[in-house]
Structures are given as C-alpha cells and as structure tokens.
Image: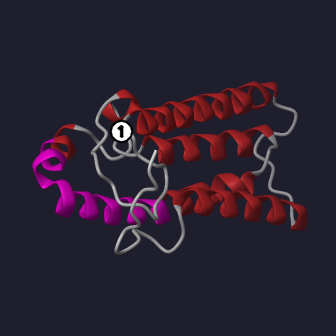
Amino acid sequence: MTKPRKRSKPSSIFPPSLVFLLLTMAGVVMELWRELPIAPGNLIRIVVGPVLILLGSALWLLAWKEFRRHGEVFGHQYATETVVTSGPYRISRHPAYLAYAVIMAGIGLFIDCGWIMLLLPVAVLIVNVSAGREESYLMARHESIYRPYRSEVRRWI
C-alpha cells in the first residue's frame, strides 16, 4: 500500500478521537476533585456501561474495517480518495464519532461519573463542528458522490 497524500488543509485542530479522550479524562479528574455520582450502587449502570463500551467499540471497528476495505486511511491528516458509503456508513456519515460518543457514555455509566456524562454533549458539539468541516471538504472534493449521500444519510444517526 502506498503512503496516502496529506490534505492541503486539515479538517480540525484536534482530531475527534482526541476530543473524546481528553474530555473523558477531564471528567475523571473532575470526579477525583468532587464526586458527581449518577446512580451509586445501581446494578443497571454496571451492566449497561460495559454493553455501551462494547457496542461503541464494535461500531468503531466496523467503521475502521470499512475504511480499510476501500483503501482509505483512518486519519484526518490524509486526503480522501473515496467516499465510503457502505457498512456502518449507510446509517451514519460519522460512525466512528458516534462510536466514540457511545464509548464515552459507557465509561461514564460504568464508573459512575456524572462529570463524563456532563462533558459528553460538549464533546459532541465540538466534534459536530469538525464533522461539518470534513463534510465541506468532501463536498468540495467529491461533490457528485457526496451530495446524494449526504441527503440520504444522517450525520449521526
């Protein structure tokens, strides 16, 4: 496989994966400072949290595999040669970002961290801006394919 071309302009300052990771870590640090429990002692969150983490991880893996199947690299710094519209991309234009959000929610539930749950919408808002920039990039580069895809598939779900 040849090395992919770098984009002329990156889509965002911070990759969305980093946004979710840093805000999850910030939630843990805030929890150490002052606890904000969601449902202490609740067995449902202890079951639902790991299930969400597993579902999010599976969705991310499917998105990554679909990208690789089309010869694309999962990275913001590389040019996109193809618009991937199959696999999980049939239901979401950004299944990896959706996966990160589901994983973050699962972690917040599992460790009973209300701060993570409060920071989740912030992460989604920041990543939504990044997703918009990526979509503008794809529209400029692959308009004939991306325009109909964008009108048929929702950004998140």
> Residue lying farthest front?
2
Residue nearest the observer in this picture, 25 or 46 = 25
Asked whether, in this view, residue 68 is left or right of residue 137, the answer is right
Residue nearest the observer in this picture, 122 or 55 = 55
Q: Is residue 5 magenta?
A: no
**Residue position for label 1:** 92
Image coordinates for residue 40, horizontal then vertical, percent: 85, 39
In the image, the segment drawn in magenta is 125-148
Inspect the image, locate mark 1, and give the three-letter code of the amino acid beneath it. Ser
SS for dot 1: loop
Residue nearest the observer in this picture, 15 or 44 = 15
Asked whether, in this view, residue 72 is left or right of residue 111, the answer is left
Identify the residue at horizontal 46%, vertical 44% (top origin). Answer: 1
Image coordinates for residue 75, horizontal then vertical, percent: 49, 56
The relative height of residue 42 versus residue 135 in the rendered view (above or below) is above
Q: Is residue 135 magenta?
A: yes
Identify the residue at horizontal 75%, vertical 32% (top origin). Answer: 45
Identify the residue at horizontal 45%, vertical 37% (top origin). Answer: 68
